[in-house]
Amino acid sequence: MLLLNKIDDVRKNIKDWKEEKYTIGLVPTMGALHKGHASLIKKAKETCDKVIVSIFVNPIQFGPNEDYDKYPRTIEKDSELCRELGVDIIFAPAPEEMYGENKKLSNNEFTFIYPAYNYVDCMCGKSRPGHFDGVATVVMKLFNITKADYAFFGQKDAQQLFILKQVVKDLNLDINIISCPIVRETDGLALSSRNTYLSETERKNAITISKALFKIKELYETGIKDTNIMFDTAISILNKDIDLEYLEFRNFETFEKVNELKKNTLIAIAAKSGKTRLIDNIIL
Ligand code: PAF
């Protein structure tokens, strides 16, 4: 396994791989890898001849008051996991390698990708303005650097997944986006690098987020479809110390809000446990 920090070094390897007609899979991550990332890497290994994992805490997707500085950086542990899983290249650039020295990372001095407003100006985009522009921009750069045939993303970031699929479609990019299921702890908590911020009590309270989602699914399976009933049920299950940011019901093909649940409805929650912002969802 190669651990590369420079774009040119990645490109040299890609050139050889392309000549050999190998299929290339990219797993974009911000590091602090857990079992959720491992499942993406395993899927990439099953699907592609060569697998690149990018590890880059992307400054332009963090707001000024968010956790960019404190975001966990665990490159040694991450490398070990990648090696065990048979990853071919880890690409772990410094911010200067991705965005150049001396640039102000604003759209006055740098080219951004702005995904369609309707998909960005809702849910996580409401409380994290600019977040999805930063995600789309870095992901498009990674696609260009790696020339990957497939890219693997977790369903946990459902809005991110939807937006990236739309960007790929709208810009006619020649890459397949593969969505991978959410990986959960045995008690239901969706795996996230940010779970490490939770105290014992905050973690216990956070479990009620997935409990609320599972209850909605259970009710749907008994024939209840009204989202108002689902909303009230979820509120009654969420621990009182969980600070709900949104609970939304959207058609996962169009991203429109729905009043009645049906197949392919995304049910998505964002909430804080203590100071930690968590997201979770299910798709029916
Ligand atoms: O989901 C993430 O970890 C990040 O948003 C991504 C896709 C790696 C872009 O920085």
Image: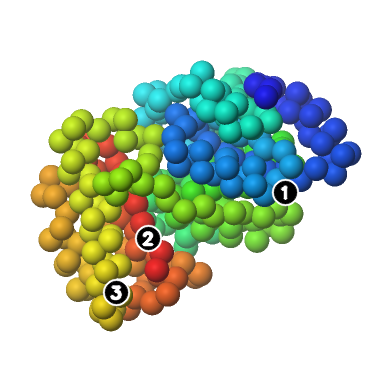
Q: Is residue 100 above or below residue 244?
A: above
Q: Amino acid at mark 1?
A: Asp
Report if the CB atoms under discs 2 and 3 are less than 8 Å apart.
no
Give the spatial CA distance, label 3 vs label 1. Answer: 37 Å
Q: Which of pointers 3 and 1 lies earlier in the amino acid sequence?
A: 1
Closer mark to the observer between disc 3 and disc 1: 3
Give the spatial CA distance, label 1 vs label 2. Answer: 27 Å
Q: Nearer the viewer, residue 206 or 245?
A: 206
Q: Position of residue 248 (x, y in %)?
A: 32, 63
Q: Which residue is mark 2?
A: 282
Q: Position of residue 19 (x, y in %)?
A: 89, 39
Q: Which residue is mark 1?
A: 149
Q: Amino acid at mark 3?
A: Tyr
Horizontal side of 136 relative to 256 (left or right) equals right
Give the spatial CA distance, label 2 vs label 3. Answer: 12 Å
Q: Position of residue 182 (x, y in %)?
A: 42, 51
Q: Is residue 220 visible?
A: yes
Q: Amino acid at mark 2?
A: Ile
Crowd tier of the residue under label 2, counting other residues whose Cα lies within 10 Å: few below 14, some 14–19, many 20 or above: many
Horizontal side of 111 relative to 274 (left or right) equals right
Report if the CB atoms under discs 3 and 1 are less than 8 Å apart.
no
Quadrant of the rendered image containing residue 42: top right
Q: Residue furthest right?
A: 19
Q: Quadrant of the N terminus?
A: top right
Q: Secondary structure at mark 1?
A: loop
Residue under the image location 51 percent in, 43 percent down: 39
Q: Quadrant of the C terminus?
A: bottom left
Q: Which of pointers 1 and 2 lies earlier in the amino acid sequence?
A: 1
Residue under the image location 49 percent in, 70 percent down: 254
Number of marks in picture = 3
Q: Which residue is mark 3?
A: 220
